[in-house]
Image (cartoon, helix red, strand yellow):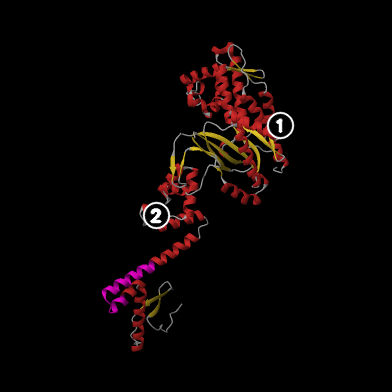
């Protein structure tokens, strides 16, 4: 392609390379001199470009230097610039906090920003901060102490001061009842069915002065009646949900020793009446087999027409359930004391469990088999976990292994019967105690009651088997009036009746 005879104007010229490609080269333009106006516009463009390269802060600083101001005013202007920058960053932080979906996180971040430059004793917390922290602390004090290392939370002393402001007096807690009355209209029937649980707890005999109430505490106190005797026990009533996870202390009383059966029956009746008036329904009462408790329940059956496992209140049945872990512990104690038991065609011996513990001590080293399990003393005898562990599948498996040993051929059948009885007690506990959480669920063994589970059939079968359960010593003398056996039979019947009643109420 031949080169064009015309030359490009301006600062460029175009040549053709030997390969036929165009090449543009910059050459000085001498044929077109620039005018004065063009040179001045070029200088302005250069000045504008240099100004763009300067940051805004540099421009503001240069302008301030051009203005004749005093050093004091210059310092104030510098602080003003810093304040404006701080406000801008705070606005951005405020937007980020507002975008948080959790109100709890908003409170934590806001309190952290407010208290970040304050000393530990000068930090201030809102009532929402304290209530949220108190909820965590009541769930797990150990976890709360660890969280205080990771995030700003109120001190434990601050939470204790908050709890002291809560008015808690012996007797019925009216604040809880008022809250139940507000919840009742918006709750379904499943959430309003509950159990009344009561028990006694031992206290040290002492007198203390309460600044919050301005009185001396430590005497017998029923709320409406106070005596000049030192209390050594507290009688506590708690409301527990059947269909929902609800655990709420309802009333407490300071007593000495124990309360009379007549007074306890009146307290139970009054509490059930108050709970019913609040809109909730008490379907069962749960307690241990203390003589006072059993006497009070017998009186309630007499005062209000009742059956074998319930008493009536305002034409509604209130089923009696004895505390299942205590019943299991009582079975273990009777087995330990007498040495032999029989249920149906099976016969068990406590000596087999002692032998298993000795073998375990020397060979197996299982944690569920120690001398504390087979020979519990003092406080160990009152702990439920040792009874649950001795009546476990692990112990039954070791007994079966022991029965197959060549040394025990002549008594393998006796050991095997003890193993089968231990398996039955383990199954009984699983089907009446229930799982502590999702991780504790065992399908078909330990799970919550539903239409798909076989709890109803198992409860009915165990009621028949427990009616044949007897304890006797090595002389063959049978133990009389074993309360835990009858307590288990009554509790199993109550569990069955409660399940049938909640089905009628439309649970399923």
Image quadrant for the C terminus? Answer: top right
When the figure is inspected, residue 8 is found, relative to residue 138, above or below; the finding is below
Question: Who is closer to the viewer here, 176 or 504?
Answer: 176
Locate residue 167 relative to residue 120 in the image: left or right: right
Around disc 1, counting alpha carbons within 10 Å, would you say few (fewer than 14), some (14 to 19), or many (20 or more)? Answer: few
Around disc 2, counting alpha carbons within 10 Å, would you say few (fewer than 14), some (14 to 19), or many (20 or more)? Answer: some
Residue receiving disc 1? 307
> Which residue shows up at 27% across the image and 79% down it?
68
Q: Residue furthest front?
A: 228
Question: Who is closer to the viewer here, 290 or 223?
Answer: 223
Locate residue 364 relative to residue 393 in the image: left or right: left
Locate residue 67 relative to residue 89 in the image: left or right: left
> Looking at the picture, how far across and down is residue 173, in whole percent?
56, 45
Indicate the secondary structure of the residue bearing disc 1. Answer: loop
In the image, which is nearer the foreground, mark 1 or mark 2?
A: 1
Q: Distance between the residues labelled 1 and 2?
A: 61 Å
Inspect the magenta stretch and tell me whether residue 185 lies in it.
Answer: no
Q: What stretch is highlighted in magenta?
A: 62-85
Question: Who is closer to the viewer here, 113 or 213?
Answer: 213
> Which residue shows up at 37% across the image and 75% down it?
52
Q: In which quarter of the image is residue 47?
A: bottom left
Inspect this view and state whether residue 454 appears. no
> Looking at the picture, how far across and down is residue 274, in whole percent?
63, 44
Tell me which label, 1 or 2, sits earlier in the chain. Answer: 2
> Looking at the picture, how far across and down is residue 263, in whole percent?
60, 35
Indicate the secondary structure of the residue bearing disc 2. Answer: loop
Residue receiving disc 2? 123
Residue 445: which disc?
Answer: none
């Amino acid at each position: 392609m031949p080169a064009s005879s015309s030359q490009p104007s301006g600062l460029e010229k175009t040549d053709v390379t030997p390969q036929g490609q165009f090449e543009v080269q910059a050459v000085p333009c001498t044929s077109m001199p620039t005018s004065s106006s063009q040179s001045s516009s070029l200088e302005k463009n250069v000045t504008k470009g240099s100004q763009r390269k300067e940051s805004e802060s540099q421009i503001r600083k240069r302008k301030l230097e051009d203005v004749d101001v005093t050093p004091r005013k210059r310092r104030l202007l510098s602080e003003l610039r810093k304040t404006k920058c701080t406000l801008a960053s705070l606005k951005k932080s405020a937007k980020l906090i507002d975008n948080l979906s959790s109100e709890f996180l908003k409170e934590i971040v806001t309190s952290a920003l407010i208290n970040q430059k304050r000393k530990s004793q000068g930090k201030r917390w809102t009532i929402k901060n304290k209530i949220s922290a108190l909820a965590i602390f009541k769930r797990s004090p150990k976890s709360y102490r660890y969280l205080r290392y990771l995030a700003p939370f109120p001190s434990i002393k601050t939470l204790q001061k908050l709890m002291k402001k809560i008015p808690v007096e012996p007797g019925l807690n009216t604040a809880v009842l008022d809250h139940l009355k507000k919840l009742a209209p918006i709750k379904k029937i499943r959430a309003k069915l509950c159990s009344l649980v009561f028990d006694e707890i031992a206290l040290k005999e002492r007198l203390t002065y309460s600044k919050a109430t301005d009185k001396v505490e430590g005497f017998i106190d029923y709320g409406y009646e106070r005596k000049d005797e030192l209390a050594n026990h507290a009688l506590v009533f708690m409301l527990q949900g059947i269909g929902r996870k609800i655990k709420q202390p309802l009333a407490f009383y300071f007593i000495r020793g124990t309360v009379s059966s007549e007074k306890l029956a009146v307290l139970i009746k009054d509490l059930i009446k108050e709970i019913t008036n609040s809109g909730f329904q008490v379907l069962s009462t749960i307690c241990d087999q203390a003589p006072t408790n059993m006497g009070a329940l017998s009186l309630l059956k007499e005062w209000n027409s009742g059956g074998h496992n319930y008493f009536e209140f305002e034409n509604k049945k209130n089923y009696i359930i004895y505390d299942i872990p205590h019943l299991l512990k009582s079975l273990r104690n009777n087995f330990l004391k007498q040495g032999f038991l029989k249920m149906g065609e099976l016969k068990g011996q406590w000596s087999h469990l002692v032998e298993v513990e000795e073998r375990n001590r020397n060979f197996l080293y299982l944690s569920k088999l120690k001398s504390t399990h087979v020979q519990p003393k003092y406080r160990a005898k009152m702990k439920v976990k040792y009874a649950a562990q001795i009546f476990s599948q692990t112990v039954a498996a070791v007994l079966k292994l022991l029965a197959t040993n060549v040394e025990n051929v002549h008594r393998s059948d006796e050991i095997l019967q003890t193993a089968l009885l231990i398996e039955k007690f383990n199954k009984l506990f699983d089907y009446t105690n229930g799982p502590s959480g999702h991780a504790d669920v065992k399908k078909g063994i330990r799970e919550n009651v539903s239409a798909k589970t076989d709890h109803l059939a198992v409860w009915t079968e165990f009621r028949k088997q427990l009616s044949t359960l007897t304890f006797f010593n090595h002389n063959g003398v049978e133990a009389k009036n074993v309360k835990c056996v009858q307590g288990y039979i009554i509790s199993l019947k109550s569990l069955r009746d409660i399940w049938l009643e909640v089905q009628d109420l439309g649970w399923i």
